[in-house]
Amino acid sequence: MDVQLCWVLVDHRGGGNGMGIRINGIVIDVNDLDLLAEFWCGMLEVEVTRRESHWISLGPHLALQLVPERKTSKNRIHFDLVADDFAAAVARARELGATPVDEMQEDLWQVWQDPEGNEFCLCVS
């Protein structure tokens, strides 16, 4: 089973001013670095690439940052994870501690929460 985080990176060099802006990575605020590192490493099949007391980098473009406050509302940004084997991705998500938020939508995606309640979608395509 292969689950991929689909990155859409835009390299826009507007106005000829020489200032290129691009996304270097996505950071998730968390309360338990080890718990969420284990979850996201297991879900995305990536390794920890950098570790500090308040920060863990996972692979080249994802990081976890320790914060004191708990998540209190819906994410404003979330991951769409496309799975080659949807049933295996669902099983892996459950095994790692994720929970479904809703039923399957349009036979294409389902919203889930990681162990701290951060939403993500498991997608068929």
Image (tube, rainbow, N blue to C red):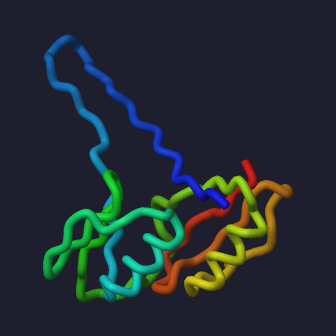
Q: Residue at x 56, y 83 (%)?
A: 96
Q: Residue at x 75, y 54 (%)?
A: 124
In screen coordinates, is 94 left or right of 115?
Answer: right
Residue 20 in picture, x, y percent from top left:
21, 26
> Would you place residue 17 above or below residue 92 in this image?
above
| Residue 67 position by quadrant | bottom left
Q: Residue at x 47, y 78 (%)?
A: 39
Residue 65 in picture, x, y percent from top left:
25, 73
In screen coordinates, is 10 left or right of 93?
Answer: left
Q: Residue at x 64, y 53 (%)?
A: 82
| Residue 51 position by quadrant | bottom left
> Would you place residue 96 above or below residue 59 in this image?
below
The N terminus: image quadrant? bottom right
> Would you place residue 105 above or below residue 67 in this image?
above
Query: Looking at this rendering, what residue extends furthest in the right direction?
Result: 107
Residue 35 in picture, x, y percent from top left:
39, 86
Residue 83 in picture, x, y percent from top left:
67, 56
